[in-house]
Amino acid sequence: MGTASQDPYYGFTRHRDLYLKADPDFNGRYTVPTLWDKKRETIVNNESSEIIRMFYSAFDEFLPEVLQEKNKPDGGLLPSSLQPEIEIFNEWTYDILNNGVYKAGFAGTQAAYDEHVVRVFEGLDRLEKHLADNAAQNRGPYMFGKHITEADIRMYPTIVRFDMAYYTIFKCNLGMIRIDYPYTHKWLRTLYWGDESGETRGAFRSTTYPEHVSTETRVHVR
């Protein structure tokens, strides 16, 4: 697996061409991810947090009933009973961790780097405590208990890339997940190696390509 040499529908080689196809007068930022409607030939959405929630149930009609979002245990990926807690969790983890590694990696001054790299590890410490508390109270292996929620999905890409790319390329090197954060490392392994027939159905492992992580991150830095 790797990056395609061109768009499979139009042969585009630049992401901005999709934006210009949708709107020839577009003059904003060409961002990813981009959810494209190939029937209407336009962009549906380019905000990752919104796209994630669309996918929870948008294709339920094509799935067996047992796999449909409405039939998942305890309310699915965003259960109403946990939504307030998950919203708060998402807010701080996005600012400090998901986006924080980029704030450190792309810092234009030493002072900015120093500020953001410290915040990244404060965020990892907070995450580690959250998971340690879960273990102490036997809540379950995931961020909010016995079932995967949106919080796990949104945190996974940052943590799985951390030691492979952010530690070295972005110089977020005050600690490593696999050495300094045992509860976070266990959570990561649980998602990656999850039972094919259980919570993960192999989805995390089958969509993670370690051989490309560092290469893609270096391209972003350049």
Image (spheres, helix red, strand yellow):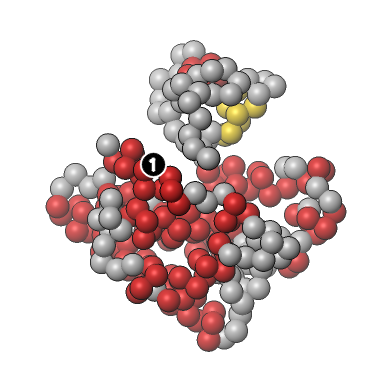
**Residue at the extreme right of the image, as rendered:** 65
**Residue 197 picture quarter:** bottom right
When asked about the image quadrant of residue 166, the answer is bottom left
Residue at 57% x, 17% y is 10
Check disc 1: other Cα within 10 Å, few if <14, some if 14-19, many if 20+.
Answer: few
Q: Amino acid at mark 1?
A: Glu
Q: Is residue 151 left or right of residue 197?
A: left
**Residue 103 rendering spot, x and y as whole percentages:** 30, 50
Residue 78: tell me if it is visible.
Answer: no
Q: Residue at x 34, y 39 (%)?
A: 220
Count of picture labels: 1
Residue under numbered circle 1: 216
Q: Which residue occupies the foreground of this view, 187 or 99?
A: 187
User: What residue lies at 69% left-to-right and 61% top-to-bottom?
Assistant: 196
Percent from the top left, x then y, of residue 219?
33, 38
Q: Disc 1 on helix, strand or loop? A: helix
Using the rendered image of the protein, determine whether residue 214 is visible from the camera's viewpoint: yes
Q: Which residue is nearer to you in this view: 40 or 166?
A: 166
Q: Residue furthest top?
A: 24
How far across and how far down the image is residue 97, in percent?
39, 58
- In this rendered view, identify the residue nearer to me: 50 or 158: 158
Among the 4 quarters of the image, the one containing residue 152: bottom right
Residue at the (55%, 62%) spot, across then down: 192
